[in-house]
Image (tube, coloured by chain):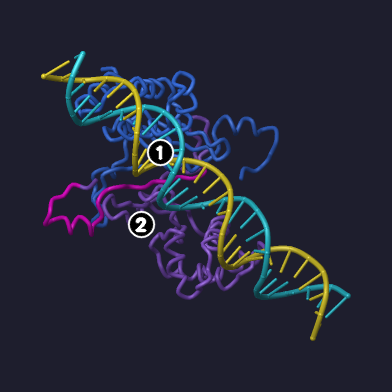
Chain colours: A blue, B purple, C yellow, D cyan
Amino acid sequence: MNKKLEIIQLLKKNGVKTTPQRLAIITFLENNLIHPSAEQIYETLKKDFPTMSLATIYNTLDKLNEIKKVIKINFSGDNKVHYDYNTHFHYHFLCNICNNIYDITPKEKPEMLGAINDGHHIEETHTYFKGICKSCFTKRKGGKNEHK
Amino acid sequence: MNKKLEIIQLLKKNGVKTTPQRLAIITFLENNLIHPSAEQIYETLKKDFPTMSLATIYNTLDKLNEIKKVIKINFSGDNKVHYDYNTHFHYHFLCNICNNIYDITPKEKPEMLGAINDGHHIEETHTYFKGICKSCFTKRKGGKNEHK
DNA sequence: TTTATAGATTATAATCCTTCTTAATTGATA
DNA sequence: TATCAATTAAGAAGGATTATAATCTATAAA
């Protein structure tokens, strides 16, 4: 089933209204798998919704996060929370140079999930990588500036 | 070699002065492996250094991070950066209830390190887990409140 | 012993992201 | 269409971190 429709139904079920602003945010996420920050969504949607408030963006993203249809990424290099519409298990790669976040699909899920380690009950597993992304690495071939 | 001495030498080598405040911060980290935030260090050291400024804490932690003797943890549940004096490879476990951060020592290092994936050059691997820590899980045995 | 100087500390202001507050508006339902 | 709770928008507020500017300190030079 279409994820957008699924979200709309889920929201309704939870007594959350589907307003034009919220639909626009969901559509943006659907069409831009770039792990945007709230700010990025805001800047884009302002064109169609000149009165849109940042608070509305945060509000909607939180609701989507609550129903587990959007994942919060809070280990980015720019100190902002980024939002991921892809909720299937995957890894993230953060480029130390351009700060973009890329998806890395694992061959298999790690086994730690659901395990008990030292008595701690593991409910979520998060893995991410840092380094130099393909694009930045290629650009760098010419110059040899160290990053950071 | 003692890590503290190693740090002091490294700082000197980098032209960073070892002031009483900085030594106190390093000693705190050495004796408190609790992944403290800057605030926590500040509150503790204020007793011995009443005029200590938060800016000094941040400044010193940044320098320690630059020489790779302290790791920044920025995926904690409380929106603060936490600092880890243990720079050996290990995992972190964040309790969803008490928000404490615990170390989990892996049996072996993951193999992704140094790999090239989709053309991205991986330089760092980070894994952390979330769930309910041993202590919170035990306490909960009686009551049955859901977290969050 | 003075002076110079480079870096460190402190207090405070500034910044930035995110959340909160409030009043007005909107949407879902009957 | 009327009702009422939910939502929006604007700005204020909050909180963590960083920047600034005025001392201060340690060391070295004179």
Q: Chain of mark 2?
A: B
Q: Chain of mark 1?
A: A
What stretch of residues is rendered in magenta? B123-146
Q: Is residue A101 above or below residue C19?
A: above
Q: Secondary structure at mark 1?
A: strand
Residue placed at 44% from the left, 49% from the top? Answer: B74
Q: Position of residue C10 (x, y in %)?
A: 57, 67
Instruction: Give the crowd class for mark 2: few <14, some 14-19, many >=20 residues within 10 Å.
Output: some
Asked which quadrant contains residue A125, the reply is top left
Q: Are marks 2 and 1 in contact (CB under 8 Å)?
A: no
Q: Nearer the viewer, residue B32 or A58?
A: A58
Label 1: how many Cα within 10 Å (few below 14, some 14–19, many 20+): some
Residue with the mark numbered 2: B103
* D15 left or right of A97 in image: left
Q: Report the front residue among C3 and B3.
A: C3
Across and down, in percent, residue B43 comes to 43, 66
Amino acid type, label 2 = Asp
Counting from the top left corner in percent of width and height, residue D23 is at 67, 70
Is A50 within the magenta? no
* Quadrant of the snapshot with the C terminus of chain A: top right
